[in-house]
Image (tube, rainbow, N blue to C red):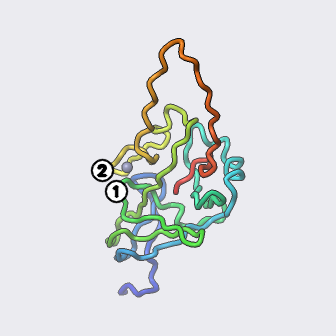
Amino acid sequence: MPATSKSPLFKVRRSKVHGLGVFAARRIRKGTRIVEYLGDRISHKVADQRYEDKLEDDGHTFLFIVDRGVVIDAGVGGNDARFINHGCDPNCESVIEDRRVFIEALRTIQPGEELNYDYQIGRADDDPPNVDEVFACRCGAVKCRGTMLWPAKRPKKRAKKPAGAKAKSKARPKSKSKSKARARR
Ligand SMILES: [Zn+2]
């Protein structure tokens, strides 16, 4: 049966990259709005509380940061968009419009190709040293940066002050835009 405009654009099945993945069921043209990222719309505070215990060794959540006020938790009431894996050289991107999140094709995608977008998970001052391992990327792209975090490397630490110099303690403002609970954006 020929594909009609009503046949599904994608299907969910097991992925070699991670768990389940989302695959093009037919040709998807560049610029196509493929799916909306749906789920429970919550505050950063609630997201932190919900996933506090998951942070240390398991980065796997279905959180997506919309802005300073809203995080979408696709672990609650989410749709297939939550199964789209991260990729460092992705064929899709996430677009935020009117505080809603859509996954759109960055280029034309052939049937059977796995969909992915760059999660660009934010770094935080209190990240554990193994944070890049926790969020290791195995997307297989030539340009794979090895981690789902963004930027690719943590900023270099400043050289230590010479001994005797008075240590200045700067008050560190709490990041308002970043949820402690790991979220893609
Ligand atoms: Zn990668």
| Res 62 quadrant in image | bottom right
Q: Secondary structure at mark 1?
A: loop
Q: Amino acid at mark 2?
A: Lys
Look at 57% across and 48% down and name the residue there: 182
Look at 46% across and 30% down and name the residue there: 157
Which is nearer the eye, 119 or 59?
Answer: 119
User: Dot 2, how many residues are within 10 Å of its Cα: few (below 14), some (14-19), or many (20+)?
Assistant: few
Ligand 1 contact, mark 1 (Cβ < 8 Å): yes
User: What is the residue that sits farthest to the top in this orientation?
Assistant: 164
User: What is the residue that sits farthest to the front in this orientation?
Assistant: 165
The quadrant the N terminus occupies is bottom left
Ligand 1 contact, mark 2 (Cβ < 8 Å): yes
Are circles 2 and 1 on residues that touch, CB within 8 Å?
Answer: yes
Which is nearer the eye, 114 or 55?
Answer: 55
Residue 144 vs 32, above or below: the answer is above
User: Which residue is identified by label 2?
Assistant: 143
User: Which residue is identified by label 1?
Assistant: 89
- In the rendered structure, find residue 155 and report the number of the disc placed on it: none
Left or right: 20 in relation to 56: left
Q: Where residue 56 sits: x, y (%)? A: 59, 37
Left or right: 39 in relation to 97: right
Q: CA distance from mark 2 to mark 1?
A: 6 Å
Residue 5 vs 74, above or below: the answer is below
User: What is the residue that sits farthest to the left in this orientation?
Assistant: 142
